[in-house]
Amino acid sequence: MVTENLKTVESNIVRACERSGRNRADVTLIAVSKTKPVEQMEEAMAAGMRTFGENKVQEIIKKQPYFPDDVDWHMIGHLQRNKVRQIAGKVAMIHSVDSLRLAEQIQKEYEAIGKVAKILIEVNIAREETKFGLMPEETEAVIREAAKMGNIEVRGLMTIAPYVEDPQENRVHFCNLRKLLVDINSKNIDNVNMTELSMGMTGDYEIAIEEGATFVRVGTGIFGSRQYAK
Protein backbone atom coordinates (compact mmCIF):
# COMPACT_ATOMS: atom_id res chain seq x y z
CA MET A 1 0.00 0.00 0.00
CA VAL A 2 2.67 2.48 1.00
CA THR A 3 4.64 1.94 -2.22
CA GLU A 4 1.56 2.46 -4.41
CA ASN A 5 0.48 5.51 -2.41
CA LEU A 6 3.93 7.04 -2.85
CA LYS A 7 3.69 6.57 -6.61
CA THR A 8 0.35 8.39 -6.62
CA VAL A 9 1.66 11.25 -4.48
CA GLU A 10 4.75 11.56 -6.65
CA SER A 11 2.72 11.77 -9.85
CA ASN A 12 0.50 14.42 -8.24
CA ILE A 13 3.56 16.45 -7.27
CA VAL A 14 4.97 16.21 -10.78
CA ARG A 15 1.69 17.40 -12.30
CA ALA A 16 1.39 20.28 -9.82
CA CYS A 17 4.93 21.36 -10.71
CA GLU A 18 4.11 21.19 -14.41
CA ARG A 19 0.94 23.25 -13.97
CA SER A 20 2.84 25.97 -12.12
CA GLY A 21 5.98 25.91 -14.27
CA ARG A 22 8.17 24.70 -11.42
CA ASN A 23 11.04 22.25 -11.27
CA ARG A 24 10.18 18.99 -9.47
CA ALA A 25 13.59 19.14 -7.76
CA ASP A 26 12.51 22.30 -5.94
CA VAL A 27 9.84 20.47 -3.91
CA THR A 28 10.75 18.10 -1.06
CA LEU A 29 8.17 15.52 -0.02
CA ILE A 30 8.17 14.87 3.72
CA ALA A 31 6.57 11.54 4.66
CA VAL A 32 4.74 12.34 7.89
CA SER A 33 5.30 9.17 9.89
CA LYS A 34 3.73 10.20 13.21
CA THR A 35 2.08 7.24 14.97
CA LYS A 36 3.25 4.94 12.15
CA PRO A 37 5.22 1.75 12.81
CA VAL A 38 8.82 1.37 11.69
CA GLU A 39 7.75 -1.36 9.25
CA GLN A 40 5.63 1.03 7.21
CA MET A 41 8.43 3.59 7.21
CA GLU A 42 10.85 0.93 6.00
CA GLU A 43 8.51 0.19 3.12
CA ALA A 44 8.51 3.89 2.24
CA MET A 45 12.31 3.94 2.47
CA ALA A 46 12.54 0.93 0.15
CA ALA A 47 10.46 2.95 -2.33
CA GLY A 48 12.96 5.81 -2.15
CA MET A 49 11.84 8.01 0.75
CA ARG A 50 14.64 9.56 2.80
CA THR A 51 12.77 12.42 4.47
CA PHE A 52 10.41 11.80 7.38
CA GLY A 53 8.44 14.20 9.55
CA GLU A 54 7.45 13.63 13.16
CA ASN A 55 5.15 15.58 15.48
CA LYS A 56 6.64 14.40 18.74
CA VAL A 57 10.20 14.41 20.02
CA GLN A 58 9.80 10.97 21.61
CA GLU A 59 8.87 9.41 18.27
CA ILE A 60 12.04 10.75 16.63
CA ILE A 61 14.16 9.42 19.49
CA LYS A 62 12.44 6.03 19.41
CA LYS A 63 12.55 5.50 15.65
CA GLN A 64 15.89 7.03 14.66
CA PRO A 65 18.06 4.04 15.70
CA TYR A 66 16.24 1.82 13.20
CA PHE A 67 17.26 3.93 10.18
CA PRO A 68 20.51 4.73 8.37
CA ASP A 69 22.28 8.06 8.74
CA ASP A 70 21.20 9.28 5.30
CA VAL A 71 17.58 9.64 6.47
CA ASP A 72 16.55 13.24 7.22
CA TRP A 73 14.25 13.82 10.18
CA HIS A 74 12.07 16.93 10.32
CA MET A 75 10.41 18.13 13.51
CA ILE A 76 7.05 19.39 12.29
CA GLY A 77 4.94 19.38 15.46
CA HIS A 78 4.70 21.80 18.37
CA LEU A 79 8.04 21.79 20.18
CA GLN A 80 8.24 22.44 23.92
CA ARG A 81 11.33 24.28 25.09
CA ASN A 82 12.22 21.56 27.60
CA LYS A 83 12.39 18.99 24.77
CA VAL A 84 14.80 20.87 22.48
CA ARG A 85 17.90 19.27 24.00
CA GLN A 86 16.68 15.78 23.06
CA ILE A 87 16.65 16.54 19.33
CA ALA A 88 19.51 19.05 19.13
CA GLY A 89 21.77 17.96 16.27
CA LYS A 90 19.50 15.04 15.40
CA VAL A 91 17.08 16.68 12.97
CA ALA A 92 17.61 18.22 9.55
CA MET A 93 15.16 21.03 10.25
CA ILE A 94 12.73 22.31 12.88
CA HIS A 95 9.59 23.55 11.10
CA SER A 96 7.57 24.69 14.08
CA VAL A 97 9.39 27.60 15.75
CA ASP A 98 6.45 29.63 17.01
CA SER A 99 8.00 32.00 19.55
CA LEU A 100 11.14 33.96 20.29
CA ARG A 101 11.56 32.02 23.55
CA LEU A 102 11.68 28.76 21.62
CA ALA A 103 14.24 30.21 19.22
CA GLU A 104 16.36 31.28 22.20
CA GLN A 105 16.21 27.76 23.65
CA ILE A 106 17.23 26.26 20.29
CA GLN A 107 20.13 28.70 20.14
CA LYS A 108 21.24 27.69 23.64
CA GLU A 109 21.11 23.95 22.98
CA TYR A 110 22.81 24.14 19.58
CA GLU A 111 25.52 26.46 20.86
CA ALA A 112 26.26 23.86 23.54
CA ILE A 113 26.96 21.19 20.89
CA GLY A 114 28.63 23.51 18.39
CA LYS A 115 26.08 23.06 15.62
CA VAL A 116 23.70 25.28 13.67
CA ALA A 117 19.95 24.65 13.68
CA LYS A 118 18.04 25.12 10.45
CA ILE A 119 14.61 26.42 11.40
CA LEU A 120 11.36 27.61 9.90
CA ILE A 121 9.15 30.16 11.62
CA GLU A 122 5.60 28.87 12.07
CA VAL A 123 2.95 31.41 11.06
CA ASN A 124 -0.74 31.13 11.89
CA ILE A 125 -1.56 32.59 8.51
CA ALA A 126 -5.29 31.83 8.77
CA ARG A 127 -5.48 33.25 12.33
CA GLU A 128 -7.12 30.15 13.78
CA GLU A 129 -7.59 30.25 17.56
CA THR A 130 -6.82 26.54 17.89
CA LYS A 131 -3.49 26.67 16.05
CA PHE A 132 0.04 27.45 17.18
CA GLY A 133 2.13 29.94 15.26
CA LEU A 134 2.92 33.62 15.15
CA MET A 135 0.46 36.08 13.71
CA PRO A 136 1.70 37.42 10.35
CA GLU A 137 2.35 40.89 11.79
CA GLU A 138 4.54 39.43 14.57
CA THR A 139 6.70 37.36 12.27
CA GLU A 140 9.24 39.91 11.05
CA ALA A 141 10.18 41.04 14.56
CA VAL A 142 10.88 37.45 15.68
CA ILE A 143 12.92 36.75 12.55
CA ARG A 144 15.00 39.90 13.17
CA GLU A 145 15.87 38.68 16.66
CA ALA A 146 16.48 35.06 15.60
CA ALA A 147 18.79 36.25 12.83
CA LYS A 148 21.13 37.66 15.48
CA MET A 149 21.64 34.20 17.01
CA GLY A 150 24.84 32.54 15.89
CA ASN A 151 23.62 28.94 16.04
CA ILE A 152 20.32 29.44 14.21
CA GLU A 153 19.69 29.73 10.50
CA VAL A 154 16.20 30.95 9.57
CA ARG A 155 15.45 29.17 6.31
CA GLY A 156 11.83 30.17 5.74
CA LEU A 157 8.23 29.96 6.92
CA MET A 158 5.80 27.16 7.77
CA THR A 159 2.05 27.05 8.22
CA ILE A 160 -0.70 24.55 8.94
CA ALA A 161 -3.68 25.56 6.83
CA PRO A 162 -7.26 25.03 7.99
CA TYR A 163 -8.97 21.69 7.46
CA VAL A 164 -11.34 22.28 4.55
CA GLU A 165 -13.46 20.11 2.27
CA ASP A 166 -12.36 22.05 -0.81
CA PRO A 167 -8.56 22.46 -0.95
CA GLN A 168 -8.98 25.50 -3.19
CA GLU A 169 -10.13 27.39 -0.09
CA ASN A 170 -6.57 27.21 1.27
CA ARG A 171 -4.99 28.75 -1.83
CA VAL A 172 -5.36 32.24 -0.35
CA HIS A 173 -3.47 31.19 2.81
CA PHE A 174 -0.59 29.63 0.85
CA CYS A 175 -0.44 32.71 -1.36
CA ASN A 176 -0.35 34.98 1.69
CA LEU A 177 2.47 32.98 3.31
CA ARG A 178 4.52 33.29 0.13
CA LYS A 179 3.85 37.04 0.02
CA LEU A 180 4.98 37.34 3.64
CA LEU A 181 8.23 35.51 2.83
CA VAL A 182 8.89 37.76 -0.18
CA ASP A 183 8.09 40.87 1.85
CA ILE A 184 10.46 39.98 4.70
CA ASN A 185 13.23 39.01 2.27
CA SER A 186 12.85 42.36 0.51
CA LYS A 187 13.86 44.18 3.71
CA ASN A 188 17.41 42.81 3.44
CA ILE A 189 17.69 41.86 7.11
CA ASP A 190 21.23 40.78 8.01
CA ASN A 191 21.64 36.97 7.94
CA VAL A 192 18.13 36.46 6.52
CA ASN A 193 17.70 34.93 3.08
CA MET A 194 14.66 32.71 3.35
CA THR A 195 13.92 30.28 0.53
CA GLU A 196 11.74 27.59 2.12
CA LEU A 197 7.95 27.41 2.42
CA SER A 198 6.64 24.40 4.36
CA MET A 199 2.95 24.26 3.54
CA GLY A 200 0.43 21.77 2.25
CA MET A 201 -0.64 18.41 3.63
CA THR A 202 -2.49 15.37 2.27
CA GLY A 203 -5.65 17.29 1.37
CA ASP A 204 -4.10 20.32 -0.27
CA TYR A 205 -0.42 19.75 -1.14
CA GLU A 206 -1.01 20.19 -4.88
CA ILE A 207 -2.47 23.67 -4.30
CA ALA A 208 0.43 24.46 -1.97
CA ILE A 209 2.95 23.49 -4.66
CA GLU A 210 1.17 25.69 -7.17
CA GLU A 211 1.57 28.56 -4.69
CA GLY A 212 5.27 27.98 -4.05
CA ALA A 213 5.68 25.28 -1.38
CA THR A 214 9.20 23.85 -1.17
CA PHE A 215 8.23 21.29 1.52
CA VAL A 216 4.93 19.39 1.53
CA ARG A 217 4.03 17.25 4.53
CA VAL A 218 2.04 14.18 3.52
CA GLY A 219 1.01 11.52 6.03
CA THR A 220 -2.38 9.96 5.35
CA GLY A 221 -1.79 10.13 1.60
CA ILE A 222 1.23 7.84 2.03
CA PHE A 223 0.57 5.70 5.11
CA GLY A 224 -3.23 5.69 5.33
CA SER A 225 -5.27 6.83 8.32
CA ARG A 226 -3.49 7.64 11.56
CA GLN A 227 -3.10 5.00 14.23
CA TYR A 228 -3.25 6.24 17.81
CA ALA A 229 -2.20 4.16 20.78
CA LYS A 230 -5.07 3.33 23.06
Image: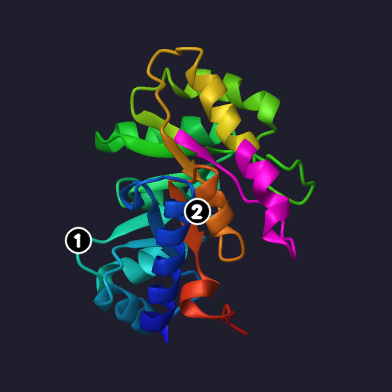
Earlier sequence position, callout 2 versus callout 1: 1
Residue 80 numbered tag = none
Decide if residue 199 is in sight here.
no
- Vertical side of 84 occupied by 217: above or below: below
Decide if residue 187 is in sight here.
yes
Looking at the picture, how far across and down is residue 90, in whole percent? 31, 52
- Real-space Cα separation, disc 2 to disc 1, in angstroms: 19 Å
Looking at the picture, how far across and down is residue 228, in whole percent? 59, 79
- Answer with the quarter of the image where residue 71 lies: bottom left
Q: Which residue is mark 1?
A: 69
Task: Please check the rendered image and state whether residue 216 is part of the magenta-colored stretch, yes or no.
Answer: no
Q: Which residue is mark 2?
A: 76
Q: Report the residue at 62% width, 51% height from top.
A: 160
Q: Dot 2, crowdedness within 10 Å: few (<14), some or many (≥20)?
A: many
**First to last magenta residue range:** 156-175
Q: Report the residue at 26% width, 38% height from top.
A: 113
- Vertical side of 66 occupied by 51: above or below: above
Q: Dot 1, crowdedness within 10 Å: few (<14), some or many (≥20)?
A: few
Looking at the picture, how far across and down is residue 98, in whole percent? 59, 38
Looking at the picture, how far across and down is residue 82, in whole percent? 51, 47
Type of amino acid at the residue the image marks with label 1:
Asp
- Vertical side of 184 occupied by 197: above or below: below
Circle 1 SS class: loop
Task: Please check the rendered image and state whether residue 163 is part of the magenta-colored stretch, yes or no.
Answer: yes
Circle 2 SS class: loop
- Vertical side of 3 occupied by 97: above or below: above
- Mark 2 and 1 residues: CB-CB less than 8 Å, in contact? no
Taking 225 as reference, is 103 left or right? left
Return the residue nearer the eye: 14 or 136.
14
Type of amino acid at the residue the image marks with label 2:
Ile
- Answer with the quarter of the image where residue 202 lies: bottom right
